Image (cartoon, grey):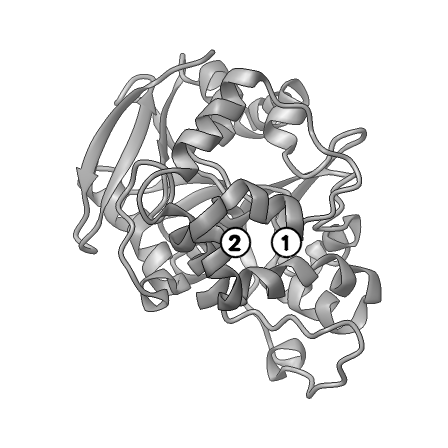
Amino acid sequence: MREFEQRRVDLATGVALNVATAGPERGDPIIFLHGFPESHRTWREQIAALSDRYYCVAPDQRGFARSEKPEGVENYTSDKLIADIFALADALGIDSFTLAGHDWGGAIAWGAAIGAPARIERLIIANAPHPLIFQRALWEDREQRAASQYMRAFRDTSHDAFIAEHGLAPFLAKVLNWNKAPALADEERAIYFRDWAETGAPIAMLNWYRAARIEVPAPEDKVERPAILDAPFPMLRMPVLVIWGMEDTALLAGQIEGLDEVIEDLTLVKVQGSGHFVTWEAPEAVTGAIESFLAR
């Protein structure tokens, strides 16, 4: 099992994060962001492969694993989550960097790159939809809307009593309907259960969904179209690599359509035979794509 040096880093945003680091501190920095329901270990295979040349930094984001878990939905809005990333870079003396994100980490990476492009040299996204394309799909793509109904369940606080009594794992088993469950080594599964058992973790993790501004209509809802879908949207100018596990049943492959309309310099890699957790379901394909991208 791969292990990395970890330390607690106090941020100017008022939270302390558990941060894994590997590689030469003078190397080109890459900050890796994980998603739900994971930790810095999302990127374990890529960090191991890249840390001979790059300074790899992978936090447990706020609310997850061994990082602080402030109470209250208001502490998990996207502006605070994005601010954590730049505060982490500042705390480590990093100015500009490559930013990589999977799932919710990808959502934060998109937001950071859109909001502060001067600090993001390159952007790497793995199975995390662009915010405009995702919101559009929730209105126009019936299959994606149906696949995203779990988000409504995650936002429903009436489940909190069940979670408090039984834990996060039974709740996820009850709510999620993955057609193909990814294979996970026993020791990695044990780490999941350990992290989910941290005090306050289940609700803190779900607060990412509860604080998000993304609108997820019920399957048959007919609601007003969000204005953002028809408004001008910033074009990303830095090089962007998007890696997509094509068998993702939560974020469907349609999410990669239209990326060239919002990204000037796009590299798109489709990984066949992999589902949502592409970084460890197909680690060699993901690592190879990243190495080629960084070598440009």
- Residue, x 38% and y 15% (percent of image)? 3
Q: Which residue is mark 2?
A: 107
Residue 218 horizontal side relative to residue 89, left or right: right
In the structure shown, which secondary structural element does the residue marked by tag 2 occupy? helix
Asked whether residue 36 is in view, the answer is: no
Distance CA(mark 2)–CA(mark 1): 7 Å
3 to 69, vertically: above or below: above
Which residue type does callout 2 highlight? Ala
Q: Nearer the viewer, residue 121 or 100?
A: 100
Residue 207 position, x and y percent, is: 43, 60
- Give the numbered dot on residue 129: 1
Instruction: Give the image quarter of residue 112.
Output: bottom left
Q: Upstream in the sequence, badge 2 or badge 1?
A: 2
Residue sticking out furthest to the front? 165
150 to 86, vertically: above or below: below
- The tally of labels here is 2
- The reply to whether discs 2 and 1 touch (Cβ–Cβ < 8 Å) is yes
Few, some or many residues within 10 Å of mark 1 (<14, 14–19, 20+): many
Residue 60 position, x and y percent, is: 36, 38
Asked whether residue 139 is in view, the answer is: yes
139 to 19, vertically: above or below: below
- Residue, x 19% and y 47% (percent of image)? 11
Residue 204 position, x and y percent, is: 38, 53
Q: Nearer the viewer, residue 126 or 190?
A: 190
Quarter of the figure with the C terminus: top right
In the structure shown, which secondary structural element does the residue marked by tag 1 occupy? loop
